[in-house]
Image (tube, grey):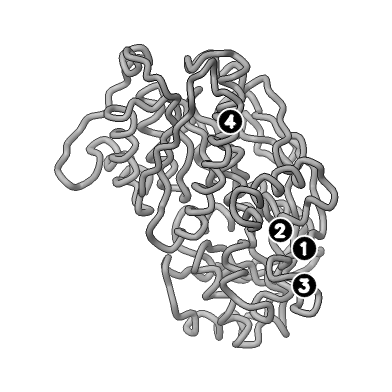
């Protein structure tokens, strides 16, 4: 699967463009420095992840606005160039190359799929452009995909599923998986299995469904017959909404605890309290963190002011911090030169919305707090946006990451 992805990137899609992506110097790409600091932002504005993608864009635009309101970099303003990658690696590679070649972007942030972000990263590192990924992936930190230009602001599946497993699992339990059959689902299952093995759990089955499935009735009886203690549903976007709604209707929550690696704010809003009630998962952010975090309150207040009282979503927060880290590094070094900005990103500690974070030097993974959340009953909700309880905040630690040796980066 990864070989075919790289072949797509080398030809930039099947549309006959046949564009080769040779490694060239930063200087040749940016020979004429534009007045604006341009950040390219490929993301799936169309497709099953569009709700999360649009939130990312909205929050990223807030980071751009704050930078510009403060005068930019010696008068140079920032600009966000958004492109629809349509959730397709080939499309993402094409759009990324256009952003670099035609639009002369200084940096890249974005993408919302494991395979798509790897396609963006492949083009970015070949062209010497810093890319800060805001979507979950384990592979992007591994030696085969990582480069000095690669940064990963988002949580990764090893961190996320591991955090949920450590919170939920009990020794001796049996676990089953309902898994979207692509990289995101596979990596999340691996994260859960690592914890299950450590704790002596029995894995009964990994039942896989195609991405974009609308009918889960062929899978649910098999899960019911297995009688697991825990069902881990490892999918994303509308797949999460549809599978949880149908699992609830089928009565599975009466027999087992349902967990997900990432409990999505937008999908809960699109669903109902009854459908999601009691489901446990992880999140990078939930807006009620403002009750215990000054940076969360500051972020929420700025977002409310900009967007008519709305609160930011989990994946929206990624868009904000993904852009802000780069722009703050640019301000600190007073330069857009890649090597200068990389050095600053590797050194900086930041707290923009939930607590202290930093990029681990060997793989540029953001070390950060992980929230464990549970979906509330309707009777417990204070308003329509108060959908999750924060059960635990696991502080950022390199102990929950794979080691640099494991990644092939030591």
Labelled pair 1, 2 in contact (Cβ < 8 Å): yes
Mark closest to the chain's N terminus, 3 or 4: 4
Residue 16, image x, y percentages:
14, 43
Asked which quadrant contains residue 269, the reply is bottom right
Give the image location of residue 155, x and y in percent. 62, 45
Return the mark for residue 69. 4
Residue 176's x, y, as percent?
Answer: 63, 70
Q: Earlier in the sequence, mark 3 or mark 2?
A: 2
Mark sitting earlier along the chain (1/2): 1
Q: Which mark is residue 381?
A: 3
- The answer to whether residue 129 is above or below residue 194 is above
Specify whether residue 370 is in view.
Answer: yes
Q: Distance between the Cα atoms at labels 1 and 2?
A: 7 Å
Q: 39 or 6: which is nearer to us? A: 39
Q: Nearer the viewer, mark 1 or mark 2?
A: 1
Cα–Cα gap, marks 4 and 1 = 47 Å
- Please name the residue that numbered disc 2 is placed on: 196
The answer for how far apart the CA atoms under marks 1 and 3 are is: 27 Å
Relative to 226, 142 lies left or right: left
Total marks placed: 4
Mark 4 burial class by Cα count in 10 Å: few <14, some 14-19, many 20+: few
Q: Which secondary structure lies at badge 2?
A: helix
Which numbered disc, 4 or 1, marks the residue that appears first in the sequence? Answer: 4
Q: CA distance from mark 3 to mark 4?
A: 36 Å
Depth check: give the residue in front, 12 or 66.
Answer: 66
Element under label 1?
loop
The image shows residue 135, relative to residue 261, as above or below, that is above
Q: Gap between marks 3 and 2, in whole Å?
A: 33 Å
Q: Which mark is residue 169?
A: 1
Name the N-terminal-most of marks 1 and 3: 1
Q: Assign a secondary structure to mark 4.
A: helix
């Amino acid at each position: 699967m990864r070989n075919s992805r790289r072949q797509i990137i080398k030809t930039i899609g099947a549309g006959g463009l046949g564009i080769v992506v040779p490694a060239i110097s930063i200087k040749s790409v940016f020979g004429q420095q534009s007045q604006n600091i341009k950040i390219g932002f490929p993301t799936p504005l169309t497709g099953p992840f569009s709700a999360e993608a649009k939130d990312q864009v909205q929050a990223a635009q807030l980071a751009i606005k704050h930078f510009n309101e403060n005068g930019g970099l010696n008068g140079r303003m920032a600009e966000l160039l958004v492109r629809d990658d349509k959730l397709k690696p080939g499309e993402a590679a094409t759009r990324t190359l256009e952003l670099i070649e035609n639009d002369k972007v200084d940096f890249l942030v974005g993408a919302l799929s494991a395979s798509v972000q790897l396609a963006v990263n492949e083009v970015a590192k070949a062209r010497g452009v810093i890319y800060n990924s805001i979507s979950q992936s384990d592979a992007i930190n591994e030696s085969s995909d990582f480069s000095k230009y690669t940064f990963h602001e988002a949580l990764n599946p090893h961190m996320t599923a591991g955090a949920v497993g450590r919170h939920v699992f009990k020794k001796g339990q049996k676990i089953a998986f309902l898994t979207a059959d692509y990289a995101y689902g596979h990596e999340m299952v691996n994260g859960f299995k690592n914890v299950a093995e450590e704790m002596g759990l029995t894995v009964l089955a990994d039942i896989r469904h195609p991405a974009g499935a609308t009918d889960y009735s062929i899978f649910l009886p098999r899960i019911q017959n297995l009688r697991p203690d825990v069902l881990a549903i490892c999918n994303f976007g509308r797949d999460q909404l549809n599978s949880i709604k149908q699992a609830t209707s089928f009565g599975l929550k009466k027999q087992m605890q349902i967990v997900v690696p990432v409990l999505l704010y937008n999908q809960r809003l699109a669903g109902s309290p009854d459908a999601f009630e009691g489901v446990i998962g992880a999140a990078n952010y939930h807006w009620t963190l403002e009750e215990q975090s000054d940076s969360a309150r500051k972020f929420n207040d700025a977002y409310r002011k900009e967007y008519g009282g709305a609160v930011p979503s989990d994946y929206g927060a990624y868009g904000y911090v993904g852009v802000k880290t780069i722009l703050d590094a640019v301000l600190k070094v007073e330069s857009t030169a890649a090597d200068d900005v990389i050095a600053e990103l590797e050194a900086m500690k930041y707290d923009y919305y939930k607590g202290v974070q930093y990029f681990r030097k060997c793989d540029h993974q953001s070390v950060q707090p992980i929230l464990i959340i549970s979906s509330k009953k309707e009777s417990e909700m204070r308003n329509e946006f108060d959908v999750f309880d924060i059960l635990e905040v696991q502080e950022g630690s390199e102990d929950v990451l794979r080691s640099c040796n494991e990644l092939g980066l030591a």
